Structures are given as structure tokens and as C-alpha cells.
Amino acid sequence: MSIHNLSSLKVNKTKVFISVFLMLFILQISYSQTSVLVVRGGHPYDTPDFENMCNSLDGVNVDLVLDAHFKSMKLDKFKKYDAVLFLNQNKYYEETARTKKLYTDLTNEGVGLVFLHFTLSSQPNWDGYHDIVGGKWFLGKFTPDKAKRSTYFIDLEVDVKVLDKKHPVTKGLKDFTMTDVFYGNIHMESEIHPLLGSDNPDLAPIAWTQKYNNSKVVYIMPGYSKKAFENPSYKKLVSNALKYVGK
């Protein structure tokens, strides 16, 4: 074999090796990503900024759907997802039996669930939903006793404190400051594990986790405005939460 042919053979082998290496590298990245369905709608929020945040979360691939689409999905469609991220709300009508079953079936299947912000005030007449989320924001319309009604604080700057520094959801997070809408005087299930809090006595815990049936569940109170969606610590918190519940 001539020197020219030997050189060509070496070059071809190198090209094959590089191609295989790149393919394996791409596959590894793909498999290491957490696959997430993002469900949103039913309440105003800074829409483009939320979607931009979702598409830029570290280690997360998302499909974004509206609440109505989510409610029409069959259970087997969720097999491709490790977790579901909710920024949706329904406080105007009684939820259908099919939708109630869908939420419960997801927890039976062990799909990870992360709820943001105003999801806490959704489904005011369905206690089973709030059992899943781990808490409830009491709407005035559905709460005759004024002392039991929940409160909210618009455009409030809060010094967020990491309560559990060893939990996977708070990994890499230090105490941080952020501005968004926050809640007070809410109900929380006794089984929840608080992750984030603050020194503000009017505010409830800012994030918590629990297990419901076979699913890991995380609730994060902020999630309304551009100021939240562009906050690096908040983005890391949401990314960590999705990876944690999706394992």
C-alpha cells in the first residue's frame, strides 16, 4: 500500500472517530436533560419573559402548552416528560371529573410536579388539588370569614432565606433578593418541607416540597413578573426543582 493510501486511511479513520464521538456527546447531552411540559394560562403574567426563562433553564428541555391543551391530553402522552411545570389557574368554574382524574393519575404515575405562584389560588372548591400542591391561597369570594382570607403584596422586594441548604432544590443557592408578588395568610399542609423563607413576618414560606402518592412536588411562590423570570437565583431555583422532581 502506498504512503498516499495509508495517509487517506488514517484521515478517514480520524473522521469516523470524530463523528462517532460527536454523536455520543450529543446523545449524552440529550439524555442528561430533564424533559418538561410547561402548562400555562388562566391568569395574566409577563408572558414572553416567562417563556424565555423556560427555554433558557439550565439542563431542561421544555414543551409549552396552554391549560386547555393540558386538560385534553391522555395520560400516555406524559411518558415522554420527567416533570410538569404549572403556571395555570382556574378559579371561575368547577373543574371536570376528567381533569381531576388527570392530576391524580399523574401523581400515581410518579410524574414530578412543580407549581408556581398563582397556582396556589386555583381550584378554590377542589380540596384534592390543594392536597397535591401542599397549600391554598384563600380567595375572598370563597371565604366569608375575612380573617381567613389570604393576602398578597405586589412588586415587593424580599430578602429570600435558604432554610434547607442541603436539599437538591436549593443546591448552589445562597440567600438572595428578588422582587415579585408574594403571599401571606395561606394554608399549608402539615407534611410540607419548607425550603425558602424570609424575615418578613407577613409572608408565608416562599418554597416548599412534599411527596404526594408517587410524585415529588415543589411549590414556589414567586413567578409573576419579568423581575422574577430574569432573576438568576430564581431561574436556578426553578431549574433545580424540575430536575429534583423529575428524577
Image: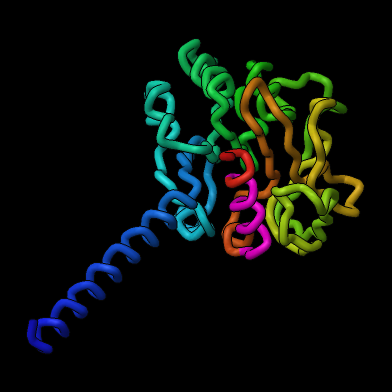
Q: Any magenta on residue 43? A: no
| Camera-nearest residue between 141 and 79 | 79
Q: Above or below — where is 167 with respect to 219?
A: below
| Camera-nearest residue between 227 and 44 | 227
Q: Position of residue 37 (x, y in %)?
A: 45, 39
> Which quadrant of the view contains residue 107?
top right
Query: Looking at the rendering, in which quadrant would you find the N terminus?
Result: bottom left
Whether residue 182 is visible here, answered yes or no, is: yes
Q: Above or below — where is 200 with respect to 56?
A: above
Identify the main secondary structure in magenta: helix
Q: Which residues are magenta?
A: 231-242
Q: Position of residue 198 (x, y in %)?
A: 85, 53
Name the residue rendered at 62%, 51% in the picture: 238
Q: Above or below — where is 178 with respect to 1?
A: above
Q: Position of residue 67 (x, y in %)?
A: 45, 32
Q: Position of residue 207 (x, y in %)?
A: 74, 44
User: Going by the image, does 147 lie left or right of 63?
Assistant: right
Q: Any magenta on residue 232? A: yes
The colour style of the image is: rainbow
Name the residue rendered at 54%, 28% in the picture: 90
Name the residue rendered at 68%, 17% in the picture: 127
> Which quadrant of the view contains residue 68?
top left
| Camera-nearest residue between 149 and 68 | 68
